[in-house]
Amino acid sequence: MYENNSAAEMYDLLYQDRKDYRAEAREVAGLIREKKGDAQSLLDVACGTGIHLEAFAGLFDRVEGVDLSRPMLEVAKQRLPDTPLHHADMRDFRLGSSFDAIVCMFSSIGYLRSTQDLDAALRTFAGNLTAGGVVVIEPWYFPQTFLDHHVSGHALTHEGRTITRVSHSTRVGNLTRMELHYVLADREGVQHRSEIDELTLFTSDEYEAAFSQAGLKVDYVASAEARPGYFVGTAA
């Protein structure tokens, strides 16, 4: 997924056109400070191209990012040249410093394949927290809320380029299988690329169990509109 800079930049443009990253960052910062009012440092896990991270940088004194995709990190580095960005797996990383808050946004947690992976990630998050630190995860959909055979699409024109994205989602067991097609048209011609994304439909109980085994007290906070809400965990 996002195997080159062109794909990462296409992702970047499409989602900036349809999501209010700054509003989401403010919402999450509010959840964090309800639990830890003096929170000043934040780690964004699966930070992608750094759009949420850029918004968090205006809300916290120190921010850093982690992602498994090098092309995504290269785009993030262009956006945030002075911010530490780490190439690492969310299931197992040590950065040499602790954070008051660790977030995992945009349902990126769903790319984990099993409850064992989910448990490992939460243990890793907890191990990189300060005392009383907070973990906020925006989950993927739950088994009972996922819409099988869902179709979506989006298009934009930006600086002489038109980009379209269409997707079709189906369920295979506890996996969401999303087939995505992108078409880019510019003065050089038309390009097409496609990909298959698979995200796990973890249950609420599985999320809460992962927080608990990591030693985090967890609450679920519902979100407005059709978004999946947040799990908010607090360390002792």
Image (cartoon, rainbow, N blue to C red):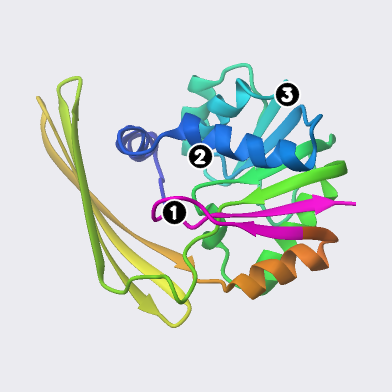
Going from N to C along the chain, the mark reached first, 3 or 2, is 2
Quadrant of the image occupied by residue 184: top left
Label 2, on which residue?
48
Q: Which residue is drawn at 49% across and 21% down?
A: 79
Task: Mark 3 and mark 1 in contact? Answer it, CB < 8 Å.
Answer: no
Q: Is residue 96 visible to the viewer in this orientation of the structure?
A: yes
Q: Gap between marks 3 and 2, in whole Å?
A: 18 Å
Q: Give the range drawn in magenta.
A: 218-236
As drawn, 144 above or below 46: below
Q: Gap between marks 2 and 1, in whole Å?
A: 19 Å
Going from N to C along the chain, the mark reached first, 3 or 1, is 3
As drawn, 191 above or below 149: above
Label 3, on which residue?
62
Q: Is residue 165 visible to the viewer in this orientation of the structure?
A: no
Going from N to C along the chain, the mark reached first, 2 or 1, is 2
Q: Is residue 235 magenta?
A: yes
Q: Where is residue 159 in the image (x, y as percent from the top left)?
A: 20, 19
* Residue nearest the viewer, comparing 162 with 187: 162
Mark 1 belongs to which amino acid?
A: Arg
Q: Is residue 86 magenta?
A: no
Q: What element carries label 2?
A: loop
Q: Residue at x 44, y 83 (%)?
A: 173
Lateral position of residue 114 relative to residue 185, left or right: right
Label 1, on which residue?
227
Q: Position of residue 67 (x, y in %)?
A: 59, 43
Q: Which residue is drawn at 73% across and 71% down?
A: 209
Q: How crowded is mark 3: few (under 14 residues within 10 Å), some or many (20 or more)?
A: some
Mark 2 belongs to which amino acid?
A: Gly
Q: Where is residue 25 in the image (x, y as percent from the top left)?
A: 55, 34
